[in-house]
Image (cartoon, rainbow, N blue to C red):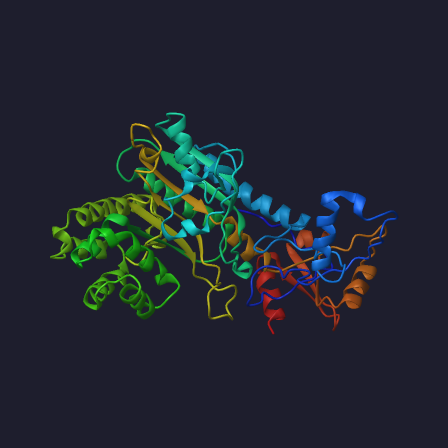
Amino acid sequence: MLRLGPLAAAGRLLPAGPRLGLPCPSGGWVSLSRSRPPGPVGDRGLLARQVRAAAGSAGGGRSPALKTPKGTRDHPPAHVALRDRLLAAVVTCFKRHGAAAIDTPVLELRETLTGKYGEDTKLIYELQDQGGELLALRYDLTVPFARYLAMNKITNMKRYHVAKVYRRDNPATTRGRYREFYQCDFDIAGQFDPMIPDAECLKIVHEILSDLQLGDFIIKVNDRRILNGVFAVCGIPESKFITTCSTVDKLDKMPWEEVRSEMVGEKGLSPEAADHIGEYVQLHGGLDLIEQLLQDPKLSQNKLAKEGLGDMKLLFEYLTLFGITGKISFDLSLARGLDYYTGVIFEAVLLQPENDHVEEPVSVGSVAGGGRYDGLVGMFDPKGRKVPCVGVSIGIERIFSILEQRLKAEMLYKKDPKLLKQLQYCEDTGIPLAAIIGEQELTDGVVKLRDVATREEVDIPREKLVDEIRRRLEP
């Protein structure tokens, strides 16, 4: 279990608001005084003229704004400490499953990345020509891993990789969506008995989300072969499978009516074909649904769909042995828009609200995802030799955003830390509650919770402290 540390005395405890994350401390321009150096201006060189020109265009000689680029942020020490604990919990799980760490360059050849991400290829950060090489910042850790396997002729490996990736996306920082962010990947490469590595990846997701205690969650699973079979029996030409898949992938963000409209209006599908797809992709369940689709008169005649459903049934049998099927949902709407997936795909989403008084779940999107990509390594191998792979990526930034907006606390550090001085600090700064832990409280297994305004104190069992603070801080 990940422990985030005890609540500090004189804690600044803020309610979990509807928005996630921390607001930017300054979104505007910061003006700094600037003295002009003595001497002629013209002899200061090209760089000085460019700096002055930039400063002048920023607003009448003012210095430029002090801010981080859009979609990025600084992390103060408290954030780094929390992130390090999260990463340690994730890496511990990866190591427990026998993975070894690798690292790859943040830069890749542009041709290595392009053509692997479907419609998201436009989100790759491309760099200017650097000495004859066209480069780009890595978009994820999966494609570099496949390149690493092919380049080093590795055919069997269990690895993890924790590093930053970059996407020219429209950031939504309140939902943990950034242009620069960490990914935590676990992958299994090589020939194994069918569906055992896939089941292990799902078990890893289950272990990590359970250990972090983020709330209730569900892991959606599907198979690209099943989806492609659905498209085929619905009369979609194979040339439109990938673009149709990208549209289906939006069902977690858009209602079916809007997805159908995009299929017909933008992707060129007939209304009848779109309606037929809708009959399938809105289904979700477990083994019973798999058995139902295996008896479907159309899908049962499609080779790809039949293979996918057979493997999905085997996967659920392994997950039953692992005892985690209660958190697994076979969901035909799950598509995951990346081109390189070839088989099982999965995505974990949170279900439980931040507290019992909020009806809507936390809006941070998925917190883990992955799947099987058996053809990706072969795209880099000179002889096209394939290495079967399956992996999962933990969305550590989104998890961080959830924990970040929970109860916040601070400790007043003083040379002479008298309790009365700390309580006076609470009154002076408007802190509503103080959590007090002394020798007696430690012995009794409680925390003394003080209402700063009324000065009322009550002993709360440790396991009930968070719920009690949330109850008191509800608006």
Let me know if residue 151 appears in the view.
Answer: yes
Whether residue 134 sits left or right of residue 403 in the image: it is left
| Camera-side residue of 470 and 362 | 362
Q: Residue at the far right: name it.
A: 38
Q: Position of residue 459 (x, y in %)?
A: 67, 63
Residue ID at (31%, 70%):
257
Q: Is residue 43 above or below residue 193?
A: below
Which residue is depicted at the point 49% across and 63% down? Answer: 362
Out of 312 and 375, give the one closest to the viewer.
Answer: 375
- Closer-to-camera residue (49/203): 49
- State whether residue 287 is above or below residue 384: below
- Residue 119 % position (x, y): 37, 53
Along the horizontal axis of the image, is 208 left or right of 80?
A: left
Residue at the image point whose x is 30% and y is 68% from the top: 261
Q: Would residue 204 be visible to someone looking at this image?
A: no
Quarter location, residue 423: bottom right
Q: How many marks?
A: 0
Q: Nearer the viewer, residue 216 or 460?
A: 216
Picture coordinates of residue 349, whole percent (x, y)? 42, 56
Q: Position of residue 221 (x, y in %)?
A: 32, 51
Quadrant where the C terminus is found in the figure: bottom right
